[in-house]
Image (tube, rainbow, N blue to C red):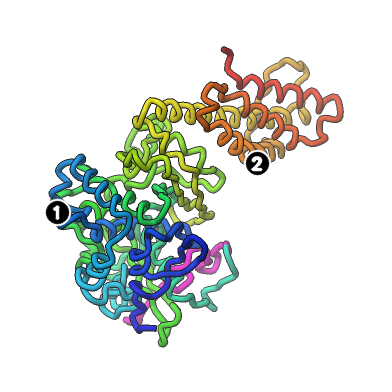
Amino acid sequence: MTGNWDLRDEPWIPVRFADVAARVGLRELFHRAHEIEDLELPVPPAASGLLRILAAMTARIVRVGAERLDDRKRADSIEDWLDLRDGVLAQGRFEAAAVDAYFDDEVPEGRFGLFHAERPFLQDPRLRTQCVDAKGKPNPSGVNKLVFGRPTGVNGAVLFGHFTDGDPVPIPPAEAAWHLIAQLYYGPAGQCTPRRITTEKPGNGEAGPLRRSVSFHVWGPNLFTGLVLGVPAPSDQVDLDGEDLCPWEDDLPDPLAPGPLTWPGRWLTGRARHAVLLVPSVDGNEVTDAYVTWSNRQSASAVADPNVILDMPKAGGAPFARRADGQRAVWRDIDALLLKGNSQGRRPLVFDDLPSDCLSALRVRAYGFDQDGQQRDSGWFEATTPPVLGWQQGVSDAADAMALHVARCHQGAEEVGRRLDYAAKLAWKLSTDPPEDPTAKVKIDDKKPGPWARAAVGHYWPAAERTFWQLATPQQLDIPAHRPFVEVALDALDAAMGSAGADLRGARARSRARATIRAAVPHP
């Protein structure tokens, strides 16, 4: 093992080939991307960030003749750039010589070393002297601050293991690299390790650019296809003329000045609001400590990330990235990925202008991190859809029909789900505190919903997902969207209530709740 722990060749990225799982370095990943079927990082926010890093590298590596995918001449015309991308896809794999040229010649030596003394990968070595206490001694943040899921401080929540700041457990370099990337994209806002640049020593920062969001990626039959399609097309939202350098290609940034948001490298990799520095053990076999602090005092760019669905606030204002919800399955976002844009949200920019000849083989990979906007982390998730991108609106008349059908199915599931939630609360109210007039309108107290609503909804959504995929076929285009979900909701209500309807009061409550659910079916 080298002292720098070179990410080009050290095995740190878990992947799956056709019949075997393995770990590879960056070089082998690009050499064999056409053979790799999946990324298998156990930390989804790290996978989300890594895919953006790999997409930026892809734009540097792939070539058709002398032209690269980040060629500024092609950026003037989206049609010309799409033609260039089609030529890259036709090659079917990364050229080994181009991969080696990028990693060995085009990036300054040492920039891929996780523990390099002067320019460690994606880290800021200045933190050794800028994060110090009043006596000038180093003031690191602790390895628990680096690792998502570990508690920090006296009252930190225990999510994935019993760790304490008094007895921190070191982690291997590969895992440190995962959490380094996750911190740069999903790190918290608020209090952090103080960092002195001038006479001031701020100890707070902004949230990472993807915090509490769900990230969507085009997932091809192999990693090569997915990475090429993960490079966003040129957009007038970002600078298409300025020098585009990723953090590992550029000089250390000025923490007091905003950096340019250029296409595609900075757009994908240059938006971090945190600065991190890993502290390895003497032998380089572990990471024993880390500095985690703010990276920039300027306001974050308002330009949208190319891999998020944009939702519009109900009261008007700027669109925002769709929030990650650990209780919300990815199929409930499918219509927003297929439609060009409606009340369900604007699909991610990387989903625009996909090549029509491979759409039918393209799936969607989603990575979500359920967090609040500040410090609290609830949990993360990863999900992959079947090949649905062939139904994108605008591809063909048949695709348009399927996109609208999928949207109707999702709308039906959501409306019935809301009706089930109300009906279960109504049943609880009627069975515990019925009105004197059985036909009177019942007012539901959401502060006292009873136990049935949560149980009913918990039964409903997994079954609704199965029903959704049964309906999401061209053969089911004429099936009314609401009715199948009503049957699912009735079963969910019965499962939640159990034997509660055995007496007369319970039977009446169940009957009225079921009638409420059936009313969700629209009249012809």
Q: Residue at x 52, y 74 (%)?
A: 165
In this picture, is 415 found above or below 382?
above
Residue annotated with mark 1? 242
Quarter of the image that includes the C terminus: top right
Q: Residue at x 61, y 20 (%)?
A: 521
Image location (x, y in percent) of residue 407: 47, 29
Viewer-proximal residue, 438 or 41?
Answer: 41
In the picture, measured across the screen, residue 154 lies left or right of residue 513, that is left
Tag 2 secondary structure: helix
On whether residue 148 falls in the magenta region, the answer is yes
Range of residues picked out in magenta: 133-159
Residue annotated with mark 2? 458
In this picture, is 25 found above or below 478?
below
Q: Residue furthest front?
A: 91
In this picture, is 2 found above or below 171?
below
| Badge 1: residue crowd in 10 Å (few <14, some 14–19, many ≥20) | few
N-terminal label among 2 and 1 = 1
Image location (x, y in percent) of residue 276: 35, 69
Question: Where residue 10 is drawn, which disc sits there?
Answer: none
| Badge 2: residue crowd in 10 Å (few <14, some 14–19, many ≥20) | some
Viewer-proximal residue, 18 or 200?
Answer: 18
Viewer-proximal residue, 226 or 297?
Answer: 226
Image location (x, y in percent) of residue 109: 23, 76
